[in-house]
Amino acid sequence: MDGSATVLVLGGTAEARALAAALVERGVPVVSSLAGRVARPRLPEGEVRIGGFGGPGGLATWLADHDVAAVVDATHPFAERIGTSAAVATERGGVPLLRLQRPGWQAGPGDDWHWVDSLDEAAAGVPALGERVFLTSGRQGLAAFAGLTTTWFLARCVDPPEPPLPPRLEVLLSRGPYRLADESALLREHRVDVVVTKDSGGELTRAKLVAARELGLPVIVVRRPLRPAVPEVTDVDSALNWVVARVTQP
Ligand code: NAP
């Protein structure tokens, strides 16, 4: 590709890594940005920077300093603050912004899903549904369940969680993707009677929902937060086409 303007991919997801790899393959200068939350992140191909920008103002300065031609916000659907930062900073700098966001999960026949608006609401709904909870809301989401002192939790996260935590807690450190047979075995082995998840979407972590359906378990699903309205695509190829159309010199 001709020209030197950079594409910034706000990452932390499998889709962001796939987009970075595709841009590197096409010779498009790309910088992937990670928050630095995970101790040993899966690194995308190409240049990577790690750590916050310092809010929308910091991101706007970074875009100007690095001659950024386009930004793709490929962050997780529950990463609320960086989504807002991206919208504000790109508008300020006149830089095109696209959100790459996988579709949310949809309940199907046989699913017993209970939609809630927040982790606090999920915690409030647990006692009516079960006593042994499989919790996949991430280590930063555990605090919302700390007040449930009689409920037993199996929490799966990438890095060890920090207090406040529910007192009856077993932590399973692991990183997806997960297979249906393993998810079913995990739920059975721990005698789980309710599953709590955020609506992250995608195939990599969907097996737990299928396992729950097959075992007849209720699932509490936290709705995605509202993020600023920006142009959006749901797959990597569409994001790639959008970027290439903006950075390729005629
Ligand atoms: P958040 O609440 O939106 O972000 C908090 C702060 O972290 C932001 O204000 C920003 O700091 C910094 N930040 C977030 N994403 C960044 C990125 N890609 N590059 C540079 N700085 C970033 O997000 P979060 O929920 O803590 O998630 C952090 C990261 O983990 C995201 O990148 C997301 O893609 C990934 N992730 C999140 C979840 C989830 O469930 N939330 C799940 C899987 C992966 P400044 O304001 O200083 O710029």
Image: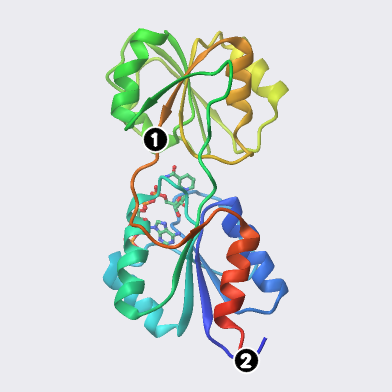
Amino acid type at circle 1 is Arg
How busy is the neighbourhood of tag 1: few (under 14 within 10 Å), some, or many (20 plus)?
Answer: some
- Helix or strand or loop: what does disc 2 sit on? loop
- From the top left corner, tell me how far across and down residue 35 is, in percent: 43, 57
How busy is the neighbourhood of tag 2: few (under 14 within 10 Å), some, or many (20 plus)?
Answer: few
**Which corner quadrant of the image does residue 51 belong to?**
bottom left
Residue at the spot 61% in from the left edge and 84% down from the top edge: 248
Residue at the spot 64% in from the left edge and 28% down from the top edge: 207
79 or 53: nearer the viewer: 79
| Label 2 residue near ligand 1, CB within 8 Å | no
Left or right: residue 99 versus residue 82 is right
Give the labeled residue for mark 2: 250
| Label 1 residue near ligand 1, CB within 8 Å | no
Which numbered dot is residue 139?
A: none
Q: Is 13 placed above or below 127 here?
A: below
Amino acid type at circle 2 is Pro
- Helix or strand or loop: what does disc 1 sit on? loop
Q: Is 18 placed above or below 134 here?
A: below
Q: How many marks?
A: 2
- From the top left corner, tell me how far across and down residue 17 is, in percent: 61, 58
Give the labeled residue for mark 1: 223
Look at the image and name its color scheme: rainbow
